């Protein structure tokens, strides 16, 4: 009898053990909470110095209260996170989900190994908001998230703020200098040259010293050269993608025209002589001293409206051969992996994780993550407050005790996780910032939103293709060196030197690059339409 009881007790213990294993909780396909019972998802996450105490974050409790999902963060210092991440996957000690710090090569490799779950079969049923965003934010959104094998191993962050389609490529011209000299905004490369020459020779700032103006200020790492490149038919100085064709721009005749034009500007003192050598600090000092005729985003450097409002966003120049105007529509706009959500094969409830991703990309979910809690008085340390003025909804930001609103938000939220940066979120975060409004107005006034062409799409390459393209670093480094030599005049641009340059590109395997990238993009297009 005693033996029978012992066996019975053992059976009960085994059943209890089985019942206590992490189970897949029932997931509500719509509405909140996401699950009827609390589900905990573990997250390996890079902790920044600006982050607050994760154990005390308002966000954790608020997210759980709304969704019934608790995030259990396994933190590693951001500076050493790559090593921590690699060790976690190598030792089979990784978490249920990942929010960021997975590169596209990580996604391809971990997906091929079966470590990341293919989320594509779950999207229609559990992530309708994400499906809608992928269908609407850009023509290449599905291509961006689909791996070469057709799977979707990570869900992206979205941006639907129209202005941001060209946020990183805004080039400004000093309208005050144009007015001082009675000049119009240039519309072609010929007119641009004439304006820059006038800036150099005619005391454009009116201070009596005709030598202190720098007509075109920039750094080679910036996109200020796109003003010239776009007028010659290309949106980038290395890789471009036109009508389904991958192009390595330095192999084109237009690139020779670009180098010739830039060399003319440099040798005639129209392009900053420090273009290839100056530091960010040196560049910024020239902008603050109001010495720049044309430059990138002066508003980021000039704190005074009296300064930065002298500059207007210069419209895309007209191609003098075709009459076409183009401006790069950033490939990162719409959907990108700056922050993401990936689910590993450790996760016991993939459906809940996908529904969480869907919620976090809604306006409500993004406000929770990126804006913090809403307050109506100044009695609290931080938050945002809605109010109406003449029938228009506006916002006030409260960050008492913090250096700025960003510092406040990092104290209460992980911040760097999947979201949708939408007009509603933008309105809260900038809270009627006059500089932001000026930039917005300039973006629309330039007309560049109407002539955008998609930059080369950010697609996920297979692990094999990524390995095969290791030589691209040397190829681009060589082109960087030759750019400096051609533009500064260290090397004359003629038929002989151009032919030698092209031969060197061949030796550095440019044709192999073109074949690999073209095949990858063709496959990505096929996968995107394979339904």
Image: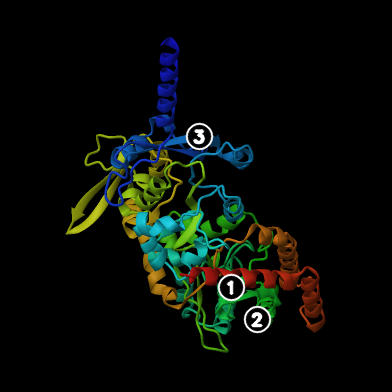
Is residue 326 positioned above or below 402 on the image? below
Lower position in the chain sequence, tag 3 or tag 1:
3
Between 85 and 300, the residue placed more toward the observer is 85
Question: Is 478 situated left or right of 30 in this image?
Answer: right
Is residue 243 positioned above or below 142 on the image? below
Q: Quick one: SS at disc 3?
A: strand
Q: Position of residue 434 (x, y in %)?
A: 35, 57
Is residue 392 positioned above or below 270 on the image? above
Q: Which residue is mark 2?
A: 254
Q: Which residue of the protein is positioned furthest toward the top in this rendering?
A: 2
Q: Position of residue 413 (x, y in %)?
A: 40, 40
- Disc number lying in front (2 or 3): 3
- Disc number lying in front (2 or 1): 1
Q: Position of residue 276 (x, y in %)?
A: 68, 62
Question: Is 260 situated left or right of 344 in this image?
Answer: right
Q: Position of residue 526 (x, y in %)?
A: 54, 72
Q: CA distance from mark 3 to mark 1?
A: 39 Å
Q: Which mark is residue 522?
A: 1
Q: CA distance from mark 2 to mark 1?
A: 24 Å
Determine contact: label 3, label 1, CB under 8 Å.
no
Q: CA distance from mark 2 to mark 3?
A: 51 Å
- Disc number lying in front (3 or 1): 1
Lower position in the chain sequence, tag 2 or tag 1:
2
Q: Tell me the quadrant of the picture where the C terminus can be found.
A: bottom left
Q: Residue at x 77, y 79 (%)?
A: 498
Classed neighbour count for the residue bearing mark 3: other residues with Cα under 10 Å, few (<14), some (14–19), many (≥20): some
Q: Which mark is residue 74?
A: 3
Q: How many marks?
A: 3
Classed neighbour count for the residue bearing mark 1: other residues with Cα under 10 Å, few (<14), some (14–19), many (≥20): some
Between 72 and 189, the residue placed more toward the observer is 72
Q: Tell me the quadrant of the picture where the N terminus can be found.
A: top left
């Amino acid at each position: 009898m005693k033996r029978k009881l012992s066996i019975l007790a053992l059976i009960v213990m085994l059943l209890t053990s089985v019942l206590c294993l992490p189970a897949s909780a029932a997931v509500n396909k719509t509405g909140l909470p996401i699950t009827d019972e609390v589900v905990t998802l573990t997250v390996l996450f890079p902790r920044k110095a600006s982050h607050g105490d994760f154990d005390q974050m308002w966000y954790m409790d608020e997210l759980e209260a709304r969704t019934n999902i608790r995030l259990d963060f396994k933190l590693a210092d951001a500076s050493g996170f790559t090593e921590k991440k690699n060790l976690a996957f190598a030792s089979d000690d990784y978490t249920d989900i990942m929010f960021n710090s997975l590169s596209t090569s990580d996604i391809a490799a971990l997906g091929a190994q079966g470590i990341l779950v293919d989320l594509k079969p779950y999207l229609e049923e559990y992530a309708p908001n994400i499906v809608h965003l992928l269908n609407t934010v850009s023509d290449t959104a599905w291509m961006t998230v689909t791996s070469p094998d057709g799977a979707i191993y990570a869900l992206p962050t979205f941006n639907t703020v129209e202005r941001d389609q060209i946020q990183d490529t805004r080039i400004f011209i000093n309208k005050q200098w144009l007015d001082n000299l009675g000049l119009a905004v240039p519309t072609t490369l010929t007119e641009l040259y004439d304006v820059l020459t006038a800036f150099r020779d005619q005391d454009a700032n009116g201070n009596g010293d005709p030598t202190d103006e720098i007509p075109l200020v920039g750094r080679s790492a910036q996109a200020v050269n796109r003003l010239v490149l776009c007028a010659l038919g290309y949106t980038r100085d290395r890789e471009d993608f036109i009508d389904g064709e991958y192009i390595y721009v330095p192999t084109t005749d237009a690139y020779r025209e670009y180098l010739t034009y830039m060399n003319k500007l440099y040798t005639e003192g129209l392009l900053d002589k420090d273009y290839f050598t100056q530091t960010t600090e040196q560049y910024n000092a020239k902008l603050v001293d109001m010495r720049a005729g044309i430059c990138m985003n002066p508003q980021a450097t000039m704190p005074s409206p009296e300064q930065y409002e002298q500059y207007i966003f210069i419209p895309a120049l007209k191609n003098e051969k075709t009459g076409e105007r183009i401006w790069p529509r950033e490939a990162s706009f719409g959907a990108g992996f700056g922050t993401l959500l990936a689910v590993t094969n450790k996760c016991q409830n993939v459906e809940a994780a996908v529904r969480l991703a869907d919620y976090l990309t809604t306006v409500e979910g993004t406000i929770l993550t990126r804006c913090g809690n809403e307050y109506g008085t100044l009695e609290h340390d931080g938050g945002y407050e809605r109010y109406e003025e003449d029938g228009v909804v506006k916002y006030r930001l409260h960050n008492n005790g913090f250096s700025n609103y960003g510092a406040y938000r990092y104290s209460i939220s992980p911040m760097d996780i999947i979201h949708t940066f939408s007009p509603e979120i933008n309105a809260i975060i900038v809270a009627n910032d006059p500089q932001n409004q000026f930039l917005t107005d300039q973006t629309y006034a330039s007309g560049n939103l109407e002539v955008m062409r998609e930059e080369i799409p950010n697609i996920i390459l297979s692990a094999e293709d990524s390995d095969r393209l290791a030589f691209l670093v040397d190829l681009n480094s060589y082109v960087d060196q030759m750019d400096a030599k051609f533009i500064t005049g260290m090397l004359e641009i003629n038929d002989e030197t151009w032919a030698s340059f092209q031969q060197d590109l061949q030796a550095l395997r440019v044709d192999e690059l073109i074949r690999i990238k073209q095949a990858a993009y063709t496959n990505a297009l096929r996968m995107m339409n394979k339904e």
